[in-house]
Image: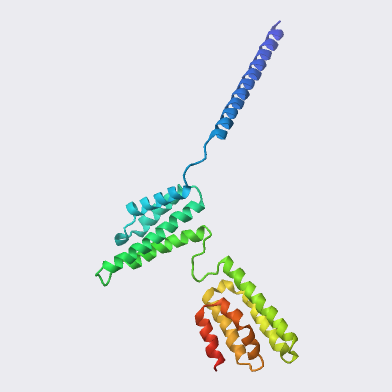
């Protein structure tokens, strides 16, 4: 009888446990269905998130940033904390971009009216801008003027390929300078691996190749034929350089 009583007690506990589990699962399922129903009924926003970010950025700049009294550590910490509460990097980029524009415009306005020859505002603002541009770099926006962007590298490589294709065409019609053209092609192709040097040094190397080969009377006419491709890689100052070299 004692054993039977114990067994009955265990059976009741198991039965209660099963009942409780079923009730919990039922409540969970009910809660899930309610949440699912609420989710399907949530309306889409009737405003643009970018408008909210713009208001936040304006309010922050107006209340927190004084370009005549920039406190780098305090200002950067405050910016960092405000960036944390934004939803995503796209919003953060917008926020930082707004601040950059406001800082630059405020400094320009200040310089117009400031009579202090040793005014620290511009230098102090550069410290703040350095931090802001650094945040953009963190979010994948390359802002260092010395760095090539992905699009710039792609465009440059496309032009370098066009140059080498043109050289192949010219080489086929003039066997006398075959070796010179092959050497030039190798030099041009090597430029594709030198983008980490930065725009200035990369440009200097490219112009060095141009000037060195223009002094070769056997290949100067070839370079004259492909010079339009070179100009696409640089600004008008390089166009003037080419014109001056041709006059040498």
- Going 72% across and 82% down the picture, which residue do you hit? 169
- Against 47, residue 127 (above or below) is below
- Horizontally, is 102 left or right of 206 in the view? left
- Going 64% across and 80% down the picture, which residue do you hit? 188
* Residue at the limit of the structure toward the top, as seen here: 1
- Horizontally, is 90 left or right of 104 in the view? right
- Going 59% across and 80% down the picture, which residue do you hit? 230
- Against 107, residue 180 (above or below) is below
| Residue 144 screen position, x and y as percent | 49, 67
**Quadrant of res 70:** bottom left
Q: What is the quadrant of the C terminus in the image?
A: bottom right
- Going 69% across and 10% down the picture, which residue do you hit? 8
* Residue at the limit of the structure toward the left, as seen here: 115
| Residue 28 screen position, x and y as percent | 60, 26
Q: How is the image coloured?
A: rainbow
| Residue 11 screen position, x and y as percent | 69, 14
Q: How many marks?
A: 0
- Horizontally, is 231 left or right of 111 in the view? right
- Against 113, residue 99 (above or below) is above
Q: What is the quadrant of the N terminus in the image?
A: top right
Q: Which residue occupies the foreground of this view, 213 or 82?
A: 213
Q: Which residue occupies the foreground of this view, 45 or 39?
A: 45
**Quadrant of res 27:** top right
* Residue at the limit of the structure toward the front, as seen here: 46
| Residue 32 screen position, x and y as percent | 59, 29
């Amino acid at each position: 009888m004692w054993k039977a009583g114990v067994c009955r007690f265990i059976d009741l506990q198991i039965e209660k446990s099963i009942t409780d589990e079923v009730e919990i699962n039922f409540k969970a399922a009910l809660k899930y269905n309610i949440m699912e129903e609420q989710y399907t009924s949530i309306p889409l926003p009737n405003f643009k998130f970018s408008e909210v970010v713009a208001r936040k950025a304006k309010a922050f700049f107006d209340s927190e940033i004084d370009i005549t009294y920039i406190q780098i550590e305090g200002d950067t910490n405050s910016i960092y904390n405000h960036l944390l509460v934004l939803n995503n990097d796209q919003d953060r980029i917008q926020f930082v971009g707004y601040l950059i524009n406001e800082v630059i415009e405020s400094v320009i306005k200040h310089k117009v009216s400031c009579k202090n020859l040793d005014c620290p505002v511009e230098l102090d603002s550069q410290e703040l801008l350095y931090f802001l541009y650094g945040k953009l770099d963190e979010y994948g926006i390359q802002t260092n003027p010395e760095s090539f962007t992905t699009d710039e590298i792609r465009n440059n490589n496309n032009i370098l390929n066009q140059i080498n294709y043109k050289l192949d065409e010219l080489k086929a019609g003039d066997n006398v300078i075959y070796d010179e053209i092959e050497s030039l092609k190798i030099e041009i192709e090597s430029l594709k691996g030198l983008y980490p040097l930065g725009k200035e040094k990369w440009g200097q190397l490219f112009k060095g190749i141009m000037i060195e080969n223009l002094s070769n009377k056997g290949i100067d006419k070839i370079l004259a034929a492909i010079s339009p491709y070179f100009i696409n890689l640089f600004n008008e100052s390089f166009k003037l350089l080419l014109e001056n070299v041709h006059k040498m």
